[in-house]
Image (cartoon, rainbow, N blue to C red):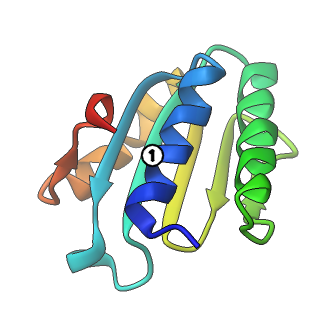
Amino acid sequence: MMDSRDKLKKVVEALNEKKGINIMAFDVDEKSGYTDYMVFVSGTSIQHNQTMSDFLQRELKKEGFIRPLIEGAQSSKWILVDAGDIIVNIMLDEIRDYYHLEDIWSDSPKVDVTSL
């Protein structure tokens, strides 16, 4: 079984493979109490968001993780993938800009996703 850092690497690789935009990750382990990493990514359309979410779920399953909890797949403007130690927010730009969720975690260490 992978540790959460390896799982984060798999998540970022999957999002990159499906052309996710502006991927950001924060190490929130010290602050959240329920997850280790919070990931944000933008999609160009509802279909793009669905594709990233579906692919991410398949990739996690291949690695032996149980099916993550999914919220928002109906509208797909904002899909939340709860993979336990990693929470992934797949959002349209306008939703991401409106909520500014990254600001909530801005005092947490930002992970350099290009180094994973």
Question: In the figure, 74 relative to 14: above or below?
Answer: below
Please tell me whether mark 1 sits on a helix, a strand or a loop. helix
Q: Looking at the image, can residue 92 be seen?
A: no
Q: Quadrant of the N terminus?
A: bottom right
Q: Quadrant of the C terminus?
A: top left
Toward the viewer: 65 or 88? 65
Residue occupying the far front of the picture: 1
Residue 7, position as x, y percentages in the image: 51, 57
Residue 59, position as x, y percentages in the image: 73, 46
For the point 74% across and 21% down, which residue is it?
48
Q: Looking at the image, can residue 106 be seen?
A: yes
Q: In this rendering, would 66 be left or right of 100?
A: right
For the point 49% across and 72% down, which residue is it?
85
Crowd around label 1: few <14 · some 14–19 · many ≥20 (10 Å): some
Q: In this rendering, would 15 be left or right of 48?
A: left
Residue 84, position as x, y percentages in the image: 57, 74
For the point 35% across and 37% down, which residue is it?
24
- Give the image quarter of residue 70: bottom right
- Give the image quarter of residue 92: top right
